[in-house]
Amino acid sequence: MVDIDAAIRYVVTNGDPVERARLAYLRAGTPPPPPALVRLEADQTAAGGWPAGGDSTVPSIDATCFRLAELDDLGGLHGAQVDRALAWLAAVQHNDGSWQEDQSLAAEAPAWAMPGDPEATLYLTAVAGFWITVAEVEAHPHHEVPPTYERTLAAATRFVAAQLRPDGSWPSFLAAGWHAAGLLHEQQHFYESARVQLVLGDRMEDMSPAEVANMAAALRRVNLGDDWLLQSARKRLGETQRKDGGWDSDEGPLFDVNTTLIAIRACKT
């Protein structure tokens, strides 16, 4: 079993103001104080996306999706800031339904965001499609009106589904799998999503705690119906939680609080 109280104490003790604001919203739905949003608002480009970091002014698909995940922890995917980001993502989608980073970012891009790389293209398409999906589900939880980005999501789904192998695996990074599963499921490609989920279940024993946390946190944002995969992931998180209440990040100790917040989100009911 996950010790949520210990995880909360870890974030309170070690987190920065934005991370503690994320925790407050995850625990009790407490709106974030305005200063917690200042950094995110300041960094957003005029185009609507967020830069990858440093002094860059070029918006990044990967960085924008990361910021959307942070905003999701700070009160949900709504408001002018999110609207601008979603509009930018839709505007830079390629004609085949995919997303790639701007070529000018190639010198600094990590492997999963390298412009022109097929594995990175599938990953970014799954992630961008997933976060637009989550925003649409939040805006229209009962699908009472057609989604604003219906064509964008349909094109992304076609691209992702076409990349799946017959056994449900995919020619890209592990994280592409759970984002693809959520995107495909919400676009009513239930068979394809189920095949991906089976592969994820088979690979869970080899996943790091951070990977399991990210997978579960993502998939709980869409209604998968039979949540066997989420239950297995939460069990795995209980087995890998440290004595201090936190979880190890794949990027080093500086990111352990972020990984712990993701684990808390994954276990939220």
Image (cartoon, helix red, strand yellow):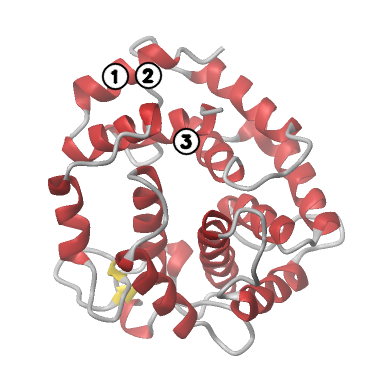
- The residue wearing badge 1 is 10
Please name the residue that numbered disc 3 is placed on: 210
Report the disc number at residue 7. 2
Q: Residue 173's image quarter?
A: bottom right
In the image: residue 35, left or right of residue 210: left
Q: Amino acid at mark 3?
A: Ala
From the viewer's side, name the closer residue of 256 and 65.
65
Q: Position of residue 79 (x, y in %)?
A: 34, 62
Q: CA distance from mark 1 to mark 2?
A: 5 Å
Quarter in which the N terminus is drawn: top right
- Mark positioned earlier in the residue sequence (3 or 2): 2
Q: Secondary structure at mark 2?
A: helix
**Viewer-nearest of discs 3 and 1:** 1
Is disc 3 in contact with disc 1, using a CB cutoff of under 8 Å? no
x, y percent for residue 158: 73, 75
Foreground: disc 3 or disc 2: 2
Asked if residue 156 is positioned above or below residue 131 in the image, the reply reads below
The reply to whether the C-beta atoms of the residues labelled 3 and 2 are less than 8 Å apart is no
Q: Secondary structure at mark 1?
A: helix
Local crowd size for mark 2, using a 10 Å CA cut-off: few (<14), some (14–19), many (≥20): many
Q: What label does residue 230 carry, if any? A: none
Question: Is residue 260 depicted above or below 82 in this figure?
Answer: above
Disc 1, disc 2: CB below 8 Å?
yes
The amino acid sitting under disc 2 is: Ala
Tell me where residue 28 sits by quadrant. Answer: top left
Count of picture labels: 3
> Helix, strand or loop at disc 3?
helix
Q: Which of the two residues, 144 or 50, is positioned nearer the viewer here?
A: 144
